[in-house]
Image: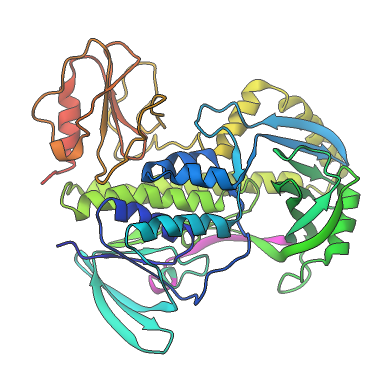
């Protein structure tokens, strides 16, 4: 019998982690020190790659989220109130060619409902008091709200417990990086007079600092503003509605009127990443592993994709379907590289938006006006923002790459009408073969490979695709040996 995985933290990352493991038939216990769920919006953007991966959970999860949110298909950039560039987001090859604007409270509600359908109920008011590791077992002590404690054994511990992660501190892992020396505020408002359609957001650049408008609904928008250099130990309180209105009047396109404040907060930007996402059978995901600027709205998405990456590997190992140390060992290098890139990209966007030197701002505006009008530049920016450009080309799990198609570690989309890779109750690899390729050999490990072989558009080619939709390896017609060897190296029982 498999011992359960303990997930600490029941936010969107922990819920996604629990949902993935539960559908792969791994017992789960998920706890959180909070006594009731937050109802504020917080993170509001779900990018295409996250929706692609959540679709694998079945039960119409991604479609349900899409039905609740606002689909944004273009980004406008203004400088001093004047149009500078417009970047379409709908030209990426994906079933979800948009950024979905949806309050985090709604995202959590949907994930929670799907998790409860699988018989898992997060336990609130329970914190992690202590834990130790021995071999392949984690022994954890949990403290209830009434002060009582319990100790139990778990197959693994996944820390989804936020930027101040007690698990990370318990492991004495460094969380290297910087706190940017500026203050920020954000809020959700009912408003009128928006000059852009509800399916477009806007970044307004200004000498004082940026103002960013994310439309959540026809009359509701998230507004993020820079407040300037930090002068106190802690961020100041957010402006009142009149203060937000004044900032928007000076920096925005004009004509927008805020009517009431639904929620607001202030913050400072940290750019930090843990030194290792894994210590034995303890794994860190989401803000426990990486924090960065909200520019690009990728924090929650990156964390949920951490969960997807880890879950299928952990499920194979805990169910005894694979034993190779490289499988769990690949989580850290794959996701730490992605986290570092997200930190770097969001940091560049923030620094570009907060330039103080007038000459530097003039050069920035001129370059952006020209470069963002070029299709290759737009496509590259789309790929970064939508996270469809994420790859694992340096992964220790990669096999060989053949032909002119995707390289090992690249994202591969299923054909229209096909089920997502990794769907179902077992994390299996998928074979795609060209029309001239015969049936697979009989010595493929059946527990690791989906029996349904899918057609491949490249004549003669064979692809092996991971359960998370990334290419494991590609070979030419008839070269089954590398595929058989790759799967057997995973060590199926």
For the magenta stretch, what is the residue range? 169-182
Q: Is the residue 420 above or below the residue 224 in the image?
A: above
In the displayed structure, does residue 11 sit left or right of residue 29? right
Image color mode: rainbow
In the displayed structure, does residue 189 sit left or right of residue 216? right
Q: Position of residue 164 (x, y in %)?
A: 51, 70
In the displayed structure, does residue 151 sit left or right of residue 319? right
Residue 143, picture quadrant: bottom left
Q: Position of residue 410 (x, y in %)?
A: 40, 31
At x 49%, y 63%, the residue is: 175
Q: Is residue 213 magenta?
A: no
At x 36%, y 57%, the residue is: 117
Q: Position of residue 493 (x, y in %)?
A: 10, 46
Q: Is the residue 16 above or below the residue 370 in the image?
A: below
Q: Nearer the viewer, residue 464 or 396?
A: 464
Residue 54, picture quadrant: top left
Which residue, as the protein is rendered here, is positioned at the far bottom?
147
Q: Is residue 171 magenta?
A: yes
How many discs mark residues in the rendered view? 0
- Which image quarter holds the N terminus? bottom left
Does residue 312 appear in this view? yes
Q: Position of residue 335 (x, y in %)?
A: 42, 48
């Amino acid at each position: 019998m498999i011992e359960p995985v303990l997930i600490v933290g029941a936010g969107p990352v922990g819920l996604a982690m629990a949902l993935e493991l539960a559908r792969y038939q791994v017992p789960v216990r998920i706890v959180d020190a909070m006594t009731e769920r937050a109802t504020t919006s917080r993170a509001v953007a779900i990018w295409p790659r996250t929706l692609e991966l959540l679709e694998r959970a079945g039960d119409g999860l991604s479609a349900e989220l899409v039905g609740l949110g606002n689909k944004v298909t273009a980004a406008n950039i203004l400088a001093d109130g004047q149009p500078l560039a417009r970047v379409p987001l709908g030209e990426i090859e994906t079933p979800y060619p948009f950024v979905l604007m949806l309050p985090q409270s709604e995202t959590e509600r949907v994930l929670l409902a799907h998790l409860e359908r699988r018989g898992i109920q997060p336990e609130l008011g329970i914190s992690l008091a202590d834990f130790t590791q021995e071999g392949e077992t984690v022994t954890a002590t949990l403290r209830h709200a009434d002060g009582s404690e319990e100790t139990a054994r778990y197959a693994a511990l996944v820390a989804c417990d936020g930027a101040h992660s007690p698990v990370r501190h318990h492991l004495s892992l460094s969380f290297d990086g910087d706190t940017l020396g500026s203050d920020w505020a954000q809020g959700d408002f009912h408003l009128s007079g928006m000059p852009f359609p509800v399916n477009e957001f806007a970044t307004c650049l200004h000498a004082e600092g940026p103002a960013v408008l994310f439309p959540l609904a026809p009359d509701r928008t998230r507004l993020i503003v820079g407040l300037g250099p930090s002068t106190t130990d802690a961020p100041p309180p957010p402006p009142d509605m009149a203060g937000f209105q004044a900032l928007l009047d000076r920096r925005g396109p004009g004509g927008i009127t805020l009517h009431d404040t639904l929620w607001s907060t202030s913050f400072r930007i940290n750019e930090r990443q843990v030194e290792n996402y894994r210590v034995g059978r303890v794994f860190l995901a989401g803000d426990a592993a990486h924090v960065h600027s909200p520019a690009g709205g990728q924090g929650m998405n990156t964390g949920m994709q951490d969960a997807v990456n880890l879950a299928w590997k952990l499920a194979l190992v805990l169910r005894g379907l694979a034993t190779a140390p490289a499988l769990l060992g690949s989580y850290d290098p794959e996701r730490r590289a992605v986290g570092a890139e997200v930190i770097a990209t969001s940091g560049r966007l923030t620094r570009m938006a907060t330039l103080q030197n007038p000459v530097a701002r003039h050069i920035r505006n001129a370059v952006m006006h020209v470069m963002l009008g070029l299709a290759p530049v737009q496509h590259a920016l789309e790929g970064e923002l939508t996270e469809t450009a994420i790859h694992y080309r340096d992964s220790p799990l990669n096999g060989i790459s053949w032909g002119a198609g995707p390289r090992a570690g690249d994202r591969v989309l299923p054909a229209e009408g096909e089920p997502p890779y990794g769907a179902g109750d077992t994390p299996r690899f998928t074979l795609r073969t060209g029309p001239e390729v015969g049936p697979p050999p009989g010595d493929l490990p059946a527990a690791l490979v989906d029996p349904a072989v899918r057609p491949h558009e490249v004549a003669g080619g064979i692809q092996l695709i991971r359960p998370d939709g990334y290419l494991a390896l590609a070979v030419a017609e008839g070269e089954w040996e590398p595929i058989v060897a790759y799967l057997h190296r995973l060590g199926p029982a």
